[in-house]
Image (tube, rainbow, N blue to C red):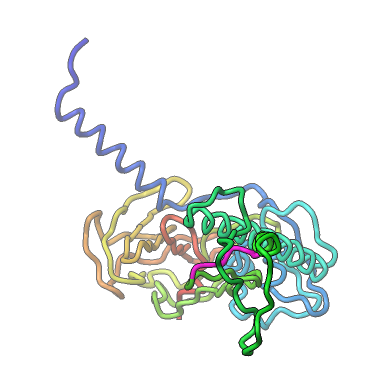
Amino acid sequence: MEKIKPDLASGFFILLALLFILSCFSPQLQKTQAMGIYHRVKKNETVRMIARAYHVKLQDLVEMNNITDLNSIKEGSVIFIPDANQVIDDVMVHVKTMDTAANLTAKKDNSDNANKLTEKNVRKEGKPATEAPALVNKKERLPMVTSQKTQQPKVTPSEETQAAEVIPAQKPPGEKIDSKPKTKLPMEEIQIEKNRFIWPVRGSVNTNFGIQPNKTYHNWIKIVSPAKTKVKAAASGTVIFSSQLKNYGETIIIRHKDNFATVYTHLKKRYVKTDQNIKKGETIAIVGETDDAGNAYINFEIRLQGKARNPLFFLP
């Protein structure tokens, strides 16, 4: 078998690298319906409570439903719960049951830790692990149980030995056993960075990020803007893709600091090339492709470590 030529081998590896980049940052077209259910908010239910009940990350829940203000959700609102297959009728009761189970588990864990610590202390004193009580020498005096100066009664050797057998092992100074279970979880906060990026074009958001009325899921926002409007880089970075892409038309992908990337699709004309360094606000393309209604538009994505995020959480 002939050996692969060096230039052919290098071209093969370049192709693999390009495919890897596209798999991490390329737009994702989703035509199938998203898996999940709709939950109607009842009285006194909160978004945090609903996220806990359904075991969904709060950030994912609010971004998918375009909830930028947790207090804006009122009784009767409808929230889409991703990947859920059954509606929880009473979220408050469900969360209370979860907390009760967590308390019992924490108490059991603390009890187990206390037993392990006692065994550890016994081993440090040179006693067998199975010997929980600490024995004292027959000639030793029993420790006082109060700070008052009272005369200690006399005990016979046999009585002293029997009393010594019920004296619990003393904990070394500095070691504490927390008898109260730590059941309170840290409050999860949502990430909103309104000024991290600028709008790539000025226009109206025709389609929001996340779940759609027909239950399909979009990784982008659709911005309707007049034809020939300049498309600007949402932040400084490096162009990692600039070409035509099937189903997306003319496409540009820019990598930014902190593992962010922005994706611009359905462009009319591109002005930048791959590996080109771009400054925030620099013109990279123009608007021109039209939808079925005849409106010129672009689709815009923000990705963090390859995962699509809601652009409205990062735009001013």
Nearer the observer, 254 or 192: 192
| Magenta span: chief secondary structure | loop
- Residue 55 appears in the rendering: no
Q: Which residue occupies the extreme top position in the image?
A: 1
- Dividing the picture into quadrants, the one containing residue 143 is bottom right
- Dividing the picture into quadrants, the one containing residue 232 is bottom left
Q: Is residue 310 magenta?
A: no
Boundaries of the magenta span = 167-172
Nearer the observer, 140 or 135: 140
Q: Which quarter of the rendering shows the C terminus? A: bottom left
Q: In this view, does 53 lie above or below 28?
A: below
Q: Residue at x 46, y 62 (%)?
A: 301
Nearer the observer, 42 or 145: 145
Q: Picture coordinates of residue 283 (x, y %)?
A: 29, 70
Q: Which quarter of the rendering shows the N terminus? A: top left
Nearer the observer, 117 or 85: 117
Q: Picture coordinates of residue 164 (x, y %)?
A: 64, 63
Q: Which residue occupies the extreme right position in the image?
A: 89
Q: Which residue is drawn at 49% across and 68% down?
A: 172
Q: Picture coordinates of residue 237 (x, y %)?
A: 28, 65
